[in-house]
Amino acid sequence: MLSPAAAEGSADFRAASDLIFMMPPVESGSLNTRRWTLVAVCVTTFMLLLDITIVNVALPSIQRRLSADLTGLQWVVDAYALALAALILTAGALADRFGRRLLFMFGVVVFTSASLLCGLAWNITALDVARGLQGIGGAALFATALALIGHEYRGADRFSAIAVWGATVGAAVASGPLVGGILTDALGWRWVFFVNVPVGAFALLVARTRMTESRDVGSVRTDLAGLVTFTTALFLIVFGLLRGNAEGWASGLILSVLVAGAALLVLFVVVEARQERPMLDLSLFRRPAFVGVSVATFAIGAGMFALFPYLSIYLQDILGASPLGAGLRFLPLTAFVFVVPIASRGIVERVHPWVLASLGLLLVAIALLLMHGLTTGSRWTALLPGFVVGGIGIGLANPILAAAALRTVDPARSGMASGINNTFRLSGVSIGVAALGAVLEDRVSASLASTAHVHSRTLAAAVSSAGTRAVGGRPGLAHSAVIAFVSGLNAVLLVGCAIVFAGAVAAGVLMRGTATGPAAAADPSPAVAEESRGT
């Protein structure tokens, strides 16, 4: 329970926040409120995910304009994904305590402001820092997305709302490469960030005027110890993976950073086990279905979504496509990500979630195998079968995993559930980008040494980030650079396949206890709710 002083302070904070954001009273549960809440959540989710996929197509242009090396280019993706992953759990806890609409609005303001700073960046370091700030705002938005839907919708209506949200995820993935290509070609790479400003302004207006506030009355404090240990651990692990090739994997710096990161993760678990109301409820991991959802969510982020930057570099810097051309070539994959969640709703209501989740990830793993085997003479159509199968797989798995994550806890702690699900997803992306990039650079370096007799980590990193442009002044190395990059991309496709396949197995084995159809998104059973309250 809150002490009188703490309760008074918390009430004063909320009153001040309501005054700052000018929040008018609106009726919770009304049809109008529910619809506008879903609109605001879907618009911001679209914006957040668009900012991952839209940037992938712009990366080669950013590399050219800002003269970025591979690490700097990886941080454009990882600074954003890392901040998201590291802060979502804390953001979910803050949302449960102080108000989900309040934190949602805070996230909109920070994300939109940081997007403006990204567009104004004068070098790669400034862009990376601004992307980290974007991630802070994005964490608040991601953490509240499913919680706001869960507060307004119940029963089968909740499943329908989550299906719409899942289709929005697909739409963002589907349109990101194309929108990124159009903006980069027509206006320049900076506009992939400037486009967020009007979208954020609209979302803020809807939140101020149409959304209701909700919070967990039992939330009494912020888990600062958990925040510090988890954020630092994730940063050290990603940093070690990003710098491993450059510094040497056996170097004292890399070994110490990776060991320290692993140790802090263990400390984070110890800290959470001792908390009365932790931001990561460890008791959830005693439920096999929850473990299966978490592993599958991490796997699809690390094995598939983390590949997008490298596929974009391949299309533009190896095959010579323009940013718009690269975006168009992604459409066979991304269109299915959008269409499948809508087309499969009737099937979802009759099939156990573990079946569709496992099948979806298995299709993604098969897709990566279909893309493997590229040669120096391959055209983009060699990726086409994998793009189609992968799009179908992602479209099947995404909404099922999101609904299953929300099902695991009492609605009062839905901010935590949403945060955990997105933490695993975005941790997968950030760690996956770093790990796959390390594999790519290592294979490129080995290939250059064997075909061109060039032993240079610097050149290998340059080829990994810029393809044949890295050897523009040395035409004799152009063919060797193509051979090296294709070899590296084939390697990361196999690694990604193994990761996603492991997620498919985890979903198939562990998610069998998950409820089927709309029940997966409905109110928890009394037993589940009581168990959640007791943790």
Image: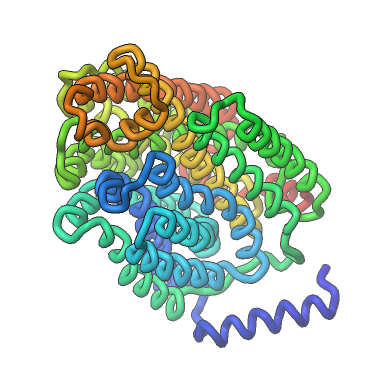
Report x, y in % for residue 373: 27, 16
Q: Is residue 179 left or right of residue 36?
A: left
Report x, y in % for residue 488: 35, 23
Q: Nearer the viewer, residue 60 or 54?
A: 60
Q: Is residue 33 above or below residue 162?
A: below
Q: Is residue 198 above or below residue 398?
A: below
Q: Is residue 183 left or right of residue 96?
A: left
Q: Is residue 436 left or right of residue 449?
A: right
Q: Residue at x 37, y 42 (%)?
A: 69
**Residue 157 visible, this angle:** no
Q: Is residue 510 above or below residue 50?
A: above
Q: Nearer the viewer, residue 368 or 401?
A: 368
Q: Residue at x 61, y 42 (%)?
A: 236
Which corner quadrant of the image does residue 389 belong to? top left
Q: Residue at x 20, y 34 (%)?
A: 472
Q: Which color scheme does this rendered protein use?
A: rainbow
Q: Is residue 104 above or below residue 507?
A: below
Q: Is residue 97 left or right of residue 54?
A: right
Q: Residue at x 34, y 66 (%)?
A: 120
